[in-house]
Amino acid sequence: MMIEQALKLKQALHNLASSDRDLSKYLLSDDEWNCIVEIHELLQVCNLLTIFILKFILINIILLYSILKKDLILLLGSYILLLLLAFQLIILY
């Protein structure tokens, strides 16, 4: 994540912004860095929750698919048997 890289490069970013008058307006205070750390932690939790929810949804979709697939096979088998019986009745008459 971009925030993670910024936190790793905090000192280098500070040094760069400090060394250039045009960049000095981008210097962050300790409070601003602390906010970035808190936002980063919150985003990590949100990311974990998103992954958990997506895995939960995917597992349920796979289970539902397998159930429906079995039911569909049984339904098609029954339908084919009914068709065969109908053809036999037609042939007998």
Image: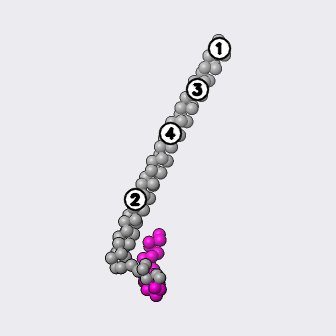
Q: Which mark is residue 81?
A: 3
Label 3 – label 4 distance at C-alpha: 20 Å
Among the 4 quarters of the image, the one containing residue 3: bottom left
Q: Amino acid at mark 4?
A: Leu
First of labels 1, 3 by sequence position: 3
Label 2 – label 3 distance at C-alpha: 48 Å
Q: Which residue is mark 2?
A: 49
Cβ–Cβ under 8 Å for marks 2 and 1: no
- Residue visible at 47% across and 43% down in the picture: 64
Q: Secondary structure at mark 1?
A: helix
Q: Is residue 84 visible?
A: yes
First of labels 4, 2 by sequence position: 2
Q: Is residue 15 visible?
A: no
- Residue visible at 45% across and 50% down in the picture: 57
Q: Which residue is mark 1?
A: 92
Q: Which residues are magenta?
A: 1-21
Where residue 43 appears, as percent x and y from the top left, is 40, 65
Where residue 80 appears, as percent x and y from the top left, is 59, 28
